[in-house]
Image (cartoon, grey):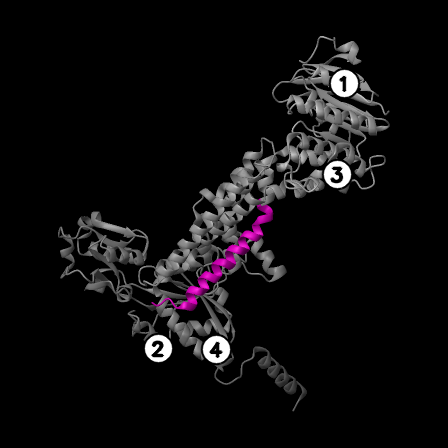
Amino acid sequence: MEFSNWEAWSAVRLSFQVGLCAVLASLPIAIAVGYLLARWQSRGKWLLEVLVNMPLVLPPVVTGYLLLLVFAPRGPLGGALDNWFGVRIVFSWLGAAIAAAVMSFPLMVRAIRLAFQAVDPRLEMAARSLGAGPVDAFFSVALPLARSGILAGCVLAFARSLGEFGATIMVAGNIVGETQTIPLAIFSRWGADAEVWRLASVSIALAAGALLASEWLERRQATRETT
Amino acid sequence: MTRTATLRIVLWVCAVIATGQSTAAADTSSLSGRLLLLAAASTTEAVDDARAEFGKLHPGVTIRVSYGASSTLAQQIAAGADADLFLSASGQWAEFLQGKQLVARGRDLFGNRLVIVTAADSNIEVKQPDDLLQPRFRRLAMADPKSVPAGVYGRQALETLGLWKQLEAKVAAAADVRQALNFVDVGAAEAGIVYATDAATDKKVRTALVFDAKLHEPIRYPLVLLKHGADRAAAVALYDFLGSPAAAAIFRRHGFVVPAAPDRPKP
Amino acid sequence: MKRLSFQCAHRFAGGFSLDAAFETSAQVTALFGPSGSGKTSVLYIIAGLLRPQSGSITLGDQTWLDTRRAVYRKAEQRHVGFVFQDHLLFPHLTVERNLTYGRRRRPGRFGAIEPRRVIEVLELGDLIGRYPRNLSGGEKQRVALGRSLLSGPELLLMDEPLAALDEGLKERILTYLERVVAEWHVPTIYVSHNAAEVRRLAEQVIVLDQGRVSQCGSPVEVLPASYSSL
């Protein structure tokens, strides 16, 4: 049961590929949702919050199973994607990216929402009074002032993607070189191979590094002048 | 020649060209395609070797394998994942898919033996299953005896021997065989019940005793050709190859029990 | 001088209700009253930053708000210059970018308000390349004033611009305000609870008390000489 170098490198490469994709794809949505949750005053807000935080509290396997049903070739989205673009989600790295994106979304939104909450909303009002429409005010004032926190959200989401297992194995399976990310590789070879510890240490180092970076960025956001 | 005869020959030639096969015995090296095989995690090394062998015969075919728990794999197939073949660690999941009308063909590929293992560096002896009742065996590691096939077979064997009631309290249920081996490795359990194939791969454990196959239901690993793969030449070829003597030799090498008797193909 | 006509009725979430109406064509009109009387809300409503349940606002021949006819002009389309109590300068932009923020969005609206003259009058020359966090309180307020002016406003709204400054500074900034009024004659609504400031700047005073207009007239009429502040 050797763990060939190629397989180990594949796992690392895939993890980065999946993580980066997941973060970049969900970033615009997370920014929109985070901003909405920070600024929107409405009694219906709790519904959005519940929806966003679901992947955080549901068993990952359940989330994965729901994604599987949606993206399978016979599913609502999977069928459309296959017919129009010839794109297969299930058992592909795209599926792993989607699973990672969904699972890390709540963390990303949380950090981004905190960032926007730290920005004085009256600054956007000042921008409005100077002739900026709401979208303009968002891009020229709110977004730049929230950027440290947004970055913190990205790093946190990336770290979460690196550790994502339960949903990934449901949607993307465990195919070496295609969908076997670091956690799956470690799990598949656990116990019988001491070399798997190398990968595990890589995993620990990456996670620790990402958490430190995220912490530092959040602190920068907090001390940044946003009023 | 008459015109209809000529037309027939022309059409036949076109058909042959279109399907890319000659009329002689199948020219296997021209097979191509991307196949998806879902296989039980406990068959990983054996299937990897078999896959490599198949690749030498059919270099144009790419086989992607996803290893996992049979239950998870079956759920994925039932939810619509387009796999071509499924190798299960128990009959239950093959039957589950058959009930969903997803199975085209099936055969039992091989079996396994159940063994008791102890840590390799310990000098604990297990001469017979009753020994497990002794107080020095505080914990017995097994895959979950309620749901994981390896654990279920283990429980059956102990039940047949009349030991289950007393040993049940000692059982340290693990999520799978790998974890059970881990328990024995690190000393969390003094002994474990696992497959012979798994015991062979873990150098930190020693096989102390092999269970008589009659003590439990026959351990079977059914290979299923799913309807999705049934009309793909490459998938059928893989299905046939895995049931062939060449593949049987590979499985035997990894410790699986391959029946010498002819298999029982399901219609 | 254009005539500003304001009327609104709005009940806030906390229970406070605003029900005020006034008209003015003065150069500087003061909104005078104790804190909590609704002065700032009136300013926000005029600016379009708060949408009242009912009301109407016209400036000259423009209708900015008329709830009976479902007319509502968005904040960014009302050419107001808002000067906040705590300046609200954009921290991530230099003084220069802050000053030109409004200009870049309303090109060609300055008419009589020339950038160079604004910088001269408010003495902003030395501050151009700096960031707001490196400015003193008085400097920040001057930049805020300049920023509103440079957006080419038809109406200046000032929400207690001197309240956050200490005494000596108040006098200095007040001088700048007088200069601005004298130079460009932009109609101004000046919110304050300080009678001395109101007497110096305003021609017309509207007194607000608990959300309602209680008095209206010239400073001499409305503010007795002994009143210093509320």
Label 4: chain?
B
- Residue interval drawn in magenta: A1-30
Reading the image, the residue beneath label 1 is C200
At label 2, which amino acid type do we have?
A: Pro
Mark 2 Cα shell of 10 Å, populated few (<14), some (14-19), many (≥20): few
- Which residue lies at the image location 73% right of the left edge and 18% below the top edge? C197
Of mark 3 and mark 1, the one earlier in the sequence is 3
Quadrant where the C terminus of chain C lies?
Answer: top right
Q: Quadrant of residue C223?
A: top right
Above-or-below relation of C194 to B178 = above
Which badge, 2 or 4, is on the more N-terminal residue?
4
Tell me how far mark 4 sits from mark 1, CA to CA: 94 Å
- Residue that numbered label 4 is attached to: B59
- Residue at point 45% right, 74% down? B237
Q: Which of the chains bears the disc numbered 3?
A: C
Pointer 2 chain: B
Q: How far apart, in angstroms, are the residues tagged by discs 4 and 3?
A: 67 Å
B47 horizontally vs C116: left or right: left
Q: Amino acid at mark 3?
A: Gly
Residue pointed to by mark 2:
B245
Res. A13 visible in picture? yes
SS state under label 3 = helix
Mark in front: 2 vs 1: 1
In whole angstroms, how far apart are the C-alphas of marks 2 and 4? Answer: 20 Å
Q: CA distance from mark 3 to mark 2?
A: 82 Å
Residue A186 belongs to magenta span: no
The label shown at residue C102 is 3
Q: Where is residue A28? Give x, y as percent.
A: 60, 48
Q: Residues within 10 Å of mark 1 (few under 14, many from 20)?
A: few
